[in-house]
Image (cartoon, grey):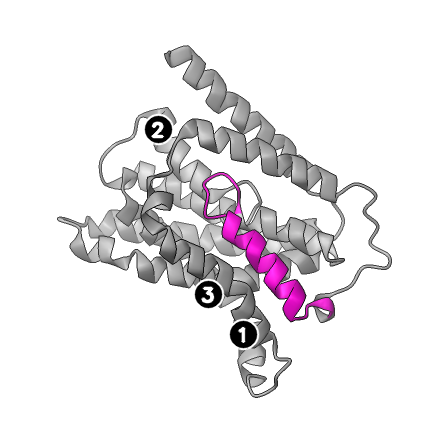
Amino acid sequence: MFEAIILGILQGLTEFIPVSSSAHLIVAPWFFKWDGIVNTLSFDVALHFGTLLALLVYFRKEWIEILATAGRKDSMLWKIAVGTIPAAVIGTAFHDSIAANRSPILIAFTLSLVSVFMIMSERNYKEEGRAGLEVINYKNALFIGIAQAFALVPGVSRSGITIVAGLVKGLKRADAARFSFLLGTPAVAGASLMEAKNLINAESIEVDIFLAGIIVAAVTGYIAIKYLLIFLQRHSMRPFAYYRFFLAFVIILSLWITI
């Protein structure tokens, strides 16, 4: 139960803070040598369902407004749909290869690489002259969606790479994060549905442990969304990039010690 709660907190925070939830869910059990139900793909799916709940609850008003404009050709709904296509296609085509990619050394590399992109995107950043979500057209949505597809590799961070893509397209930080979360809603929902068979086929499910992970991930995720949007209104992503470098260093050091 303790491990489930810790992983629920990690999932809730790192799904939205740009430090990679997949990296933390893979590295934490590996580092602390946790085994059993919490170190299974089915438990990871349950935690992602928790963060999906956080997204749906936090952005419920936005989604009601978006769905209400579905009849318009410039509706945000269709732009999100276009942005979802790259991750959906690649995730379906390379599902097994992606699921097998859980190497700590790969995670250390992707953590560091995307950190560089995050720092570069913050160079000469000025809030003045940048746009809100009105700048999102189909071309920009597709560009950010392609960036999201790279987050299928552990350690990249879906929120991190899509916020960087949003900054490249002239969005303000907070608006880039807001679109990242809206775009991520169908992506997280689709991934949860795709992996739902792991829950169905699981030999045994400890309901109390799964519920604890889901609830903790949902509550923590809601808090993470709220305060990250506030944080990015005034601060850069550099602190997250530096943390990613530190985590990559810890992973490499741990691998070196165990050789």
Residue at the spot of label 3: 186
Secondary element type, mark 2: helix
Mark 3: amino acid: Pro
Which of the 4 quarters of the picture holds residue 190? bottom left
Residue at the spot of label 2: 30
Left or right, residue 226 beside residue 52: right
First reached walking from the N terminus: tag 3 or tag 1 = 1
User: What's the residue at 58%, 52% (across, down)?
Assistant: 147
- Residue 152 vertical placement versus 110 (above, below): below
Region rendered in magenta: 135-157
**How many other residues sit within 10 Å of disc 3, few (<14), some (14-19) or many (≥20)?**
some
Determine the CA span between mark 3 and mark 2.
29 Å
- Residue 135 vertical placement versus 95 (above, below): below
- Would you say residue 82 is visible in this rendering? yes
The reply to whether the magenta stretch includes residue 19 is no
Mark 2: amino acid: Trp
Residue at the spot of label 1: 63
Left or right, residue 258 beside residue 198: right
Which image quarter holds the N terminus? top left
First reached walking from the N terminus: tag 1 or tag 2 = 2
Mark 1: amino acid: Trp
Left or right, residue 253 beside residue 242: left
Residue 155, how many percent across, how many down?
49, 38
